[in-house]
Amino acid sequence: MTNSRSSPSQDRRAPSSDSSISLFVIPGIPEIRKGQNLGRLIALAARRAGIVLEAGDILVVAQKIISKAEGRIVALSTVKPSPRALALAKKLSGDPRLMEVILRESKRVVRSERVLIVETHHGFVCANAGVDHSNVAGRDCVTLLPKSPDRSARQLAAALRKQTGKRVAVIISDTFGRPWRLGLINVAIGAAGVPAMIDLRGKRDSHRKLLRATVVAVADELAAAGGLLMGKAAGTPVVVIRGYRCRFVQDPASRIIRPAEEDLFR
Amino acid sequence: MTNSRSSPSQDRRAPSSDSSISLFVIPGIPEIRKGQNLGRLIALAARRAGIVLEAGDILVVAQKIISKAEGRIVALSTVKPSPRALALAKKLSGDPRLMEVILRESKRVVRSERVLIVETHHGFVCANAGVDHSNVAGRDCVTLLPKSPDRSARQLAAALRKQTGKRVAVIISDTFGRPWRLGLINVAIGAAGVPAMIDLRGKRDSHRKLLRATVVAVADELAAAGGLLMGKAAGTPVVVIRGYRCRFVQDPASRIIRPAEEDLFR
């Protein structure tokens, strides 16, 4: 039991603790309301499930519950669409009030054919500015992305440290589409306590050749891994990743956003 | 010990076997040469490490070792660059022979500013057609992507079944860049035995609202998860994902490729 990191039984054991990772959900997260202390609720749900968070754990948290706690919800009935929103709604056969909310969250419209792809004020390029109907109470209500997901991640990590005494990392994830490939995958829109990217340039490969263009977006890979246990409909917005070895650093996920002037596809 | 799936010890246990996943590497994969039986080598390495593969395990396998086993290696000294390759090399300050190899692997050049982004014959849109210097012996040699990564995945899954008696799934991964976001992440270029995408449309969310645009590229999320243990320089090209519940289906990763006519960013 001393070397117990990830060895459920002899025949199933991973070869060493440095080369194995486990992922599990924290069940029983309640419906989140504005102003609630998410760190306390997650810590409580973990305790109830018999889960003891450990230093180095990485919590992948669905954007939706962060937005709810931060009150980033808009009732469409309160929204008066601008002429631009009305025009977009006509073009895309959408709800003009929803278009208005999306435009308010956007710096720029990138595409408006079939779907509305924008650059948000954060710099994310995504469909509908991350404004979303799903998993929010009220037929009429939509959630917006957190104002500053990196700050939200730092605050949640701090709250969890206060609740549990453990230095855990937080990634806030959302599902984004992408050009060239179908389907959505979870990406990191906020991060605290993990490297957003790891730069392997200057290291050598197994044949002693210098690696050239190898910067890995680790926070996105962690978010995608978390997504495996985060079925949209399943009500499991918090996934723990345990055993991934990395430095505890404050490296904002916003660093992953490609600067517009370097981007060949805007 | 009977319910041992992922419970290393009491205090670290995941809440239930349906909501936990473990990832670990198969260590000791040797340098791969053309014509070798990769299924046999992987099964052997697993046995030596005391790893017993189980039905339902998903093996994420780095494209590089598939390409080597299939002899998809080109020595640049044997390549005569075409005028088009010479022009590209001049524009991008690259090696004209490398440009020639990339062009041969490509259906179309998508961008050639700073980097060369092409559409491969498979339909992947990626830098340099996946042609790569790293982790291959010989200063002069580059690897190409497998001719048909989905077929390679099916063949490897079949070979592993023969070797181990277990029905395991295979994902062949490569690191791709993407517009709008920096850094590379692992994506699935080939798959056998897992759903490439899961369509949640028609399901209802936690508030009984119909989910609309939610198709998740599960194979890509699995590849990204595998990537967490697949450091480019680390010589760990095979990662096992255990505990991810899905149907065993033949669903090619090529299905994730967005049809050109639906793509707003080509």
Image (cartoon, coloured by chain):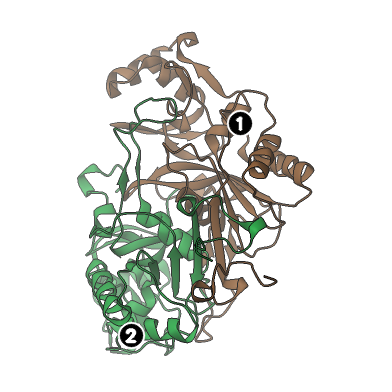
Chain colours: A green, B brown
The amino acid sitting under disc 2 is Arg
Provide residue B13's location: percent of width, then percent of height. 53, 73
In this rendering, the answer to whether A214 lies above or below B225 is above
Residue A96 visible from this viewpoint: no
Q: Which mark is residue B1?
A: none
SS of the residue under disc 1: loop
Crowd rating for badge 1 (residues with CA inside 10 Å; few <14, some 14–19, many 20+): some
Provide residue B153's location: percent of width, then percent of height. 65, 42
Determine the CA span between mark 1 and mark 2. 52 Å
In this rendering, the answer to whether B181 lies above or below B232 is below
Provide residue A259's location: percent of width, then percent of height. 22, 49
Residue in front for this viewpoint, B239 or A221: B239
Horizontal placement of B1 versus A187: left or right?
A: right
Where does the C terminus of chain B fall, quadrant-wise? top left
The amino acid sitting under disc 1 is Lys
* Quadrant of residue A68 within the rendered picture: bottom left
For label 2, the residue is: A40
Horizontal placement of B76 versus B47: left or right?
A: left
Q: Chain of mark 1?
A: B
Residue A212 visible from this viewpoint: yes
In this rendering, the answer to whether A193 lies above or below A181 is below
Provide residue B176's location: percent of width, then percent of height. 43, 42
Residue in front for this viewpoint, B54 or B215: B54
Q: Nearer the viewer, mark 1 or mark 2?
A: 2
Crowd rating for badge 2 (residues with CA inside 10 Å; few <14, some 14–19, many 20+): some
In this rendering, the answer to whether B10 lies above or below B54 is below
SS of the residue under disc 2: helix
For label 1, the residue is: B147
Q: Chain of mark 2?
A: A
Q: Are marks 1 and 2 in contact (CB under 8 Å)?
A: no
Residue at x-position 53% and y-position 33%: B64
